[in-house]
Amino acid sequence: MSATLSTLLAAFLKIGWVALIFNEVRGAILAVPVLYGMYQAGGSWMAIWIGFCSLVGIALSVILPLIAARKIQKFADEKVFKVAKEPALAHAN
């Protein structure tokens, strides 16, 4: 049972890392129009502020999944290794 769970978690985490890479690319693609818009606006304070807010929103949408993935990885590692370290007779009851 724990081997199946471990294999399943490993597969989900590999798929998750691929999704995070695509998320990084998406963030870079979304940032280009914002930077171009700031350039076209001539660098006014309003354009810079709107661009800053947009870039922070894009950064949060890219960084927060990375933080969540690390926490899930840590949680999964603790659960899988905790089960693997316990003796087999502890689960017999």
Image: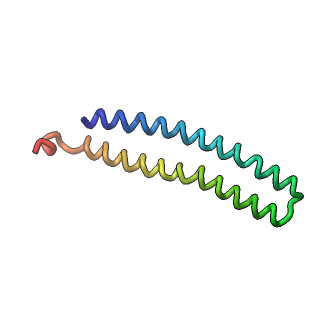
Q: How many marks?
A: 0
Q: Residue furthest left?
A: 93
Q: In this orientation, which residue lies closer to the viewer: 27 or 6?
A: 27
Q: In this picture, is 71 found above or below 24?
A: below
- Quarter assignment of residue 1: top left
Q: Position of residue 18 (x, y in %)?
A: 54, 36
Q: Is residue 49 left or right of residue 72?
A: right
- Of the 4 image quadrants, the one containing the C terminus is top left
- Quarter assignment of residue 50: bottom right
Q: Position of residue 84 (x, y in %)?
A: 26, 41
Q: In this picture, is 8 found above or below 30?
A: above
Q: Residue at x 51, y 39 (%)?
A: 17
Q: Residue at x 60, y 50 (%)?
A: 62
Q: In this picture, is 35 found above or below 88?
A: below
Q: Position of residue 22 (x, y in %)?
A: 60, 39
Q: Residue at x 54, y 39 (%)?
A: 19
Q: What's the colour scheme?
A: rainbow
Q: Residue furthest right?
A: 42
Q: In this orientation, which residue lies closer to the viewer: 29 or 17?
A: 29
Q: Residue at x 81, y 65 (%)?
A: 46
Q: Is residue 27 left or right of residue 38?
A: left
Q: Is residue 13 left or right of residue 86?
A: right
Q: In this orientation, which residue lies closer to the viewer: 57 or 85?
A: 57
Q: In this orientation, which residue lies closer to the viewer: 77 or 8?
A: 8
